[in-house]
Image (spheres, rainbow, N blue to C red):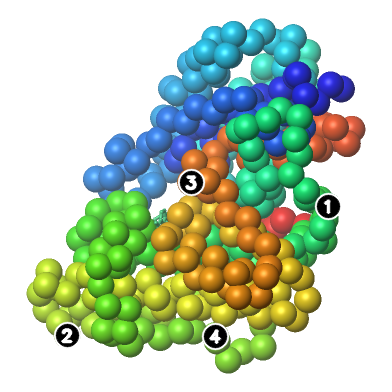
Amino acid sequence: MDTVSTYTLAIETSCDDTSVALVNGNGYVLSQMTANQDLVHKDFGGVVPEIAGRQHYESLLPLIEQLLDKNQLSWSSVNGIAVTSRPGLVGSLIVGLVTAKTLALIQNKPFIGVHHIEGHILSAFLNERSPDTQRIWQDPFVALVVSGGHTQLYHVHHIGKYETLGQTQDDAAGEAFDKFAKMLGLGYPGGVLVDRYAQKGNRKAYDFPRSLMKEDHYNFSFSGLKSHAQRKMLEIGSVASVLEDLSASYQEAIVDVLMYKLEKALRTIQLKKFVITGGVSANSRLRERAQELAAKNKWELLIPPLKFCTDNAAMIGLAGSLRLQNGETSPQTLGPVPREELK
Ligand code: KG4
Ligand code: ZN
């Protein structure tokens, strides 16, 4: 298979973003198009699965047509189809899967179901500059995946072998941001808004709990933080004048715990390379702290650009492309799996 001039068509519909992309085996993204659903879920304060599935159903095929047209690409330049098959919302996954399987049959292309989190991890190796250059991804590294649905820490032995070091026992980090934003009446999705207020606030103004810092494992817990914030807000009454300080202090509690566990993993396993990805890696304070940690220790840090941090098809394209190159394909009987650990 010529990995440079042919592309894997990738489809991501696991949650609320309909995304399609063309990616080659070196991680080069020729093009990506994403239809964001935030506006339709906004009034509900969170993703409504039924609505998400219907939106994917309406958007996906026209988006694929536009992607191929825009790049003046015919199906002969497509070497296979990659689609997120797990984990995610079943009704959303089904739309992507059925579309991928049907196109694979009609166009006689191999297709591969991809684990969404493997995609997030590999998003660190995507590039938009050169079709022939591959970023070095042979060395082992630690990956922190932080999004609205996930907070996981992995020891990536090599691409394809993932050891879970720890994960959240309750809310995901992004969920902790979103619920806090909802309590403050900031709107949905709230992470980016909390980040914005926090930039002008005092991180030490309020003392929020940092859970599971003393325990000798890499698991996380954010539900205590959320309840503490709820009590604090009731105590304060009108929060309008302290929005910035509250946001800064709350955000610092989340970032402290993430950075503590990440650093502990790097020191214990003695690795010098780490990846942070998922929607929460867009957080400005988390990025700042991660860059400081890397600089202080002369460690290598990879954080993908924003459009590859949040849910996107390019990351699924790279994971799928590597697996297809490896000779792996999925059967037409492949179904969606709402929950499955990455291994
Ligand atoms: O990866 P993603 O697009 O979707 C999944 O959840 O899989 O992540 C979305 C999450 C939301 O919870 C959103 O509030 C959070 O990422 N997020 C942020 C920021 N930007 C997005 N959280 C904190 N700071 C940000 N700047
Ligand atoms: Zn995701």
Q: Please tell me in which quarter of the rendered image ligand 1 is found.
A: bottom left
Q: What element carries label 2?
A: helix
Residue 107 appears in the figure? no
Q: As shown in the figure, which amino acid type bears the numbered disc 1?
A: Gln
Residue identifier under label 3: 306
Q: As shown in the figure, which amino acid type bears the numbered disc 2?
A: Glu
N-terminal-most mark, 3 or 1: 1
Whether ligand 1 has any atom under 8 Å from the Cβ at mark 3 is answered as no
Residue identifier under label 2: 235
At label 3, counting other C-alpha atoms closer than 10 Å, the crowd grade (few under 14, some 14-19, many 20 or more) is some
Badge 2 vs badge 1, beta-carbon distance below 8 Å? no
Q: As shown in the figure, which amino acid type bears the numbered disc 3?
A: Leu
Q: Nearer the viewer's eye, disc 3 or disc 2?
A: 3
N-terminal-most mark, 3 or 4: 4
> x and y percent of residue 177 in the render?
37, 64
Residue identifier under label 1: 138
At label 2, counting other C-alpha atoms closer than 10 Å, the crowd grade (few under 14, some 14-19, many 20 or more) is few
The quarter of the rendered structure image containing the C terminus is bottom right
Label number found at residue 212? 4
Q: As shown in the figure, which amino acid type bears the numbered disc 4?
A: Leu
Q: Nearer the viewer's eye, disc 4 or disc 1?
A: 1
Q: Residue furthest right?
A: 327
Label 3, label 2: how many angstroms apart (C-alpha)? 36 Å
Which residue is at the front of the view, 86 or 7?
7
At label 4, counting other C-alpha atoms closer than 10 Å, the crowd grade (few under 14, some 14-19, many 20 or more) is some
Which residue is at the front of the view, 226 or 257?
257
N-terminal-most mark, 3 or 2: 2
Q: Residue furthest bottom?
A: 214
Judge from the rendering whether residue 321 lies leftward or rightward of residue 301; answer left or right: right
Label 3, label 4: how many angstroms apart (C-alpha)? 29 Å
Q: Can you say whether 283 is above or below 327 in the image?
A: below
